[in-house]
Amino acid sequence: MSDEKTSPKAQPVPPQLLVLTGMSGAGRSTAAKVLEDLGFHVIDNLPPRLLEEVVTLDEDLDSPRRFAVVIDSRGGFPLTDLEKSIADLERTGILVMLIFLDADDDVLIRRYEEHRRPHPLGHGVLAEAVAAEREMFADLRASADIYINTSDTNVHELRNRIEQQFSDFKAERPMRLSVVSFGFKRGAPRDVDLMFDVRFLPNPHWEPDLRPLTGRDAAVRDHVLEQPDAVEFMERVEGLLEFLIPRFRAEGKSYVSIGVGCTGGRHRSVAISEALGKWLNDGGYRATVRHRDLGK
């Protein structure tokens, strides 16, 4: 069988329901995440008999969503149920697209051995589990609208192939950004993608008139942002973000978090975060600003 095929029933219009299935270890989790990034509402490990309810839910929504359902051998559902459910939906005029991910047996075995995960069929010998699952999926594999063999494909290449296949169906999702200020003395946040340390700027804490204020107050904001080093810092960070954000988006990342830290998280980091959030929003991005340690 060729590495990828499209059967005559696949149409150049958005399917109302995608069914993602295939061999365990062939890349279903990666493919599901890509579909989610493309705007599909992904439901994992759904019993086949509930497919019709998913389509009905889509019709009942004020703003209908496109659904992608992941069905595999983990749930122990008879795969004949899946074939029957798809056939029943198609008889009612519902466009269903079946995507089957596969890989050579030796590749699947190697992947399981590398990640030390048990096979969902639970056979004592991994090769036997793979063989048993392949037999289970034989009919679905033959009837797939889209067949992708990932034996020689890494996660980035698989992402690109899924995106190319469904590029016409992609709902534009704006990049979301989050800016959080914090104080290093209370620990750096663990969940930021980019982190900037602004402790090189003069600390308003040592100015008696500014100490009780915060970076949200005009006096502190002006004191911080009018520093020549702060002006240059903002210019450099803005240039970096102008470079990075389109590249994050090109790699399928729809959310980026930015941390800005000073000593206590009340003055410098707050003023810089507010300025950075304003610059992002003025530039057309959707950014939120949060001050982790402002009230501490």
Image (cartoon, rainbow, N blue to C red):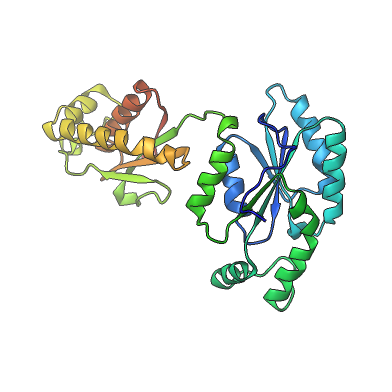
Residue at position x 78%, y 33% from top? 55
Q: Nearer the viewer, residue 109 or 146?
A: 146
* Residue 214 lies in quadrant: top left
Q: Quadrant of the N terminus?
A: bottom right
Q: Furthest residue to the bottom? A: 125
x, y percent for residue 72: 73, 55
Q: Is residue 62 left or right of residue 244?
A: right
Q: Is residue 99 left or right of residue 253?
A: right
x, y percent for residue 19: 72, 44
Q: Nearer the viewer, residue 224 or 34?
A: 34
Residue at position x 45%, y 32% from top? 175
x, y percent for residue 239: 25, 34
x, y percent for residue 18: 70, 40
* Residue 269 lies in quadrant: top left
Q: Can residue 239 be spotted in the picture?
A: yes
Q: Is residue 240 above or below residue 190?
A: above
Q: Nearer the viewer, residue 115 or 198?
A: 115
Q: Is residue 213 left or right of residue 82?
A: left
Q: Quadrant of the C terminus?
A: top left
Q: Is residue 124 above or below residue 89?
A: below
Q: Can residue 294 be spotted in the picture?
A: no
Q: Nearer the viewer, residue 176 or 129?
A: 129
Q: Is residue 153 above or below residue 234?
A: below
